[in-house]
């Protein structure tokens, strides 16, 4: 085995451990969800066992990442980014545009009709409406955001957003962890 292949394989175990801990899963919980024994997952994470495809595929599903992400596949020479749309449990589709663990996250959402359920969480949100009309419930008030408009709010305030009509709404959604906010600069 060449040195590049050995280094790629050696990095998989620690990467799996980071993914598992970021998702607040125990070894037992992650291995049960993937249909693996706890000892198998432990040995892979510590580098005492080389991961195989039959182990990596279910782990990719559990951690909701691509197989390329799990193994940090080397570049193939094709610079295009292959975005993966994901169906949302609450309805609609999201594409993760910027994956910056612990930092600013950017999604493109297409959201269909759904029931309002207020949520709160840490962080700060910015939403730009691309098409359709967005209904935003925030701190007991209702707002309708039109295409081209942008809203900004503290995500620790009770909020919900979805289409204002019985149609869909397409948005760009930026989300930053607590305290992280984008800065704007006038370049005119």
Image (tube, rainbow, N blue to C red):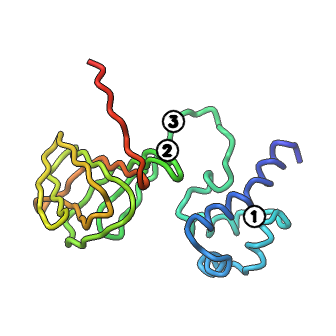
Vertically, is 183 above or below 127?
above
Drawn side of residue 39 relative to residue 17, left or right: right
Name the residue beneath numbered marker 3: 80
Q: Give the CA distance from mark 1 to mark 2.
A: 24 Å
Q: Earlier in the sequence, mark 1 or mark 2?
A: 1
Mark 3 burial class by Cα count in 10 Å: few <14, some 14-19, many 20+: few
Q: Give the CA distance from mark 1 to mark 3.
A: 27 Å
| Element marked by disc 3 | loop
Residue 65 place in picture, x, y as percent:
55, 59
Q: In which quarter of the image is the C terminus?
A: top left
| Element marked by disc 1 | loop
- Cβ–Cβ below 8 Å for labels 3 and 2? yes
Residue 80 place in picture, x, y as percent:
51, 36
Drawn side of residue 21 relative to residue 107, left or right: right
Name the residue beneath numbered marker 2: 82
Q: Which of marks 1 and 3 is nearer the N terminus?
A: 1
**Pick the front one: 27 or 96:** 27
Mark 1 burial class by Cα count in 10 Å: few <14, some 14-19, many 20+: few
Instruction: Please tell me the numbered disc located at residue 52.
Output: 1
Instruction: Please tell me the numbered disc located at residue 25.
Output: none
Task: Indicate the quadrant where residue 31 lies.
Answer: bottom right
**Residue in the picture at 25% in, 45% down:** 128
**Pick the front one: 3 or 22:** 22
**Residue in the picture at 60% in, 63% down:** 60
Residue 34 place in picture, x, y as percent:
62, 75
**Residue in the picture at 22% in, 61% down:** 161
Q: Give the CA distance from mark 3 to mark 2.
A: 6 Å
């Amino acid at each position: 085995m060449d040195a590049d292949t050995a280094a790629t394989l050696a990095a998989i175990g620690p990467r799996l451990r980071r993914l598992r801990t970021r998702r607040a899963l125990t070894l037992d919980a992650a291995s049960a969800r993937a249909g693996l024994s706890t000892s198998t997952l432990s040995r892979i994470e510590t580098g005492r066992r080389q991961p195989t495809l039959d182990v990596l595929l279910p782990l990719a599903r559990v951690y909701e990442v691509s197989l390329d992400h799990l193994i940090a596949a080397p570049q193939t020479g094709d610079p295009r980014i292959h975005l993966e749309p994901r169906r949302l449990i609450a309805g609609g589709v999201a594409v993760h545009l910027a994956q910056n663990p612990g930092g600013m996250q950017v999604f493109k959402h297409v959201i269909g009709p759904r029931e309002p359920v207020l949520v709160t969480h840490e962080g700060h949100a910015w939403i730009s409406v691309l098409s359709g009309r967005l209904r935003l419930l925030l701190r007991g008030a209702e707002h309708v955001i039109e295409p081209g408009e942008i809203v900004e709010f503290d995500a620790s305030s009770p909020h919900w957003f979805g289409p204002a009509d019985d149609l869909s709404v397409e948005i760009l959604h930026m989300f930053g962890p607590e305290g992280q906010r984008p800065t704007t600069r006038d370049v005119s």
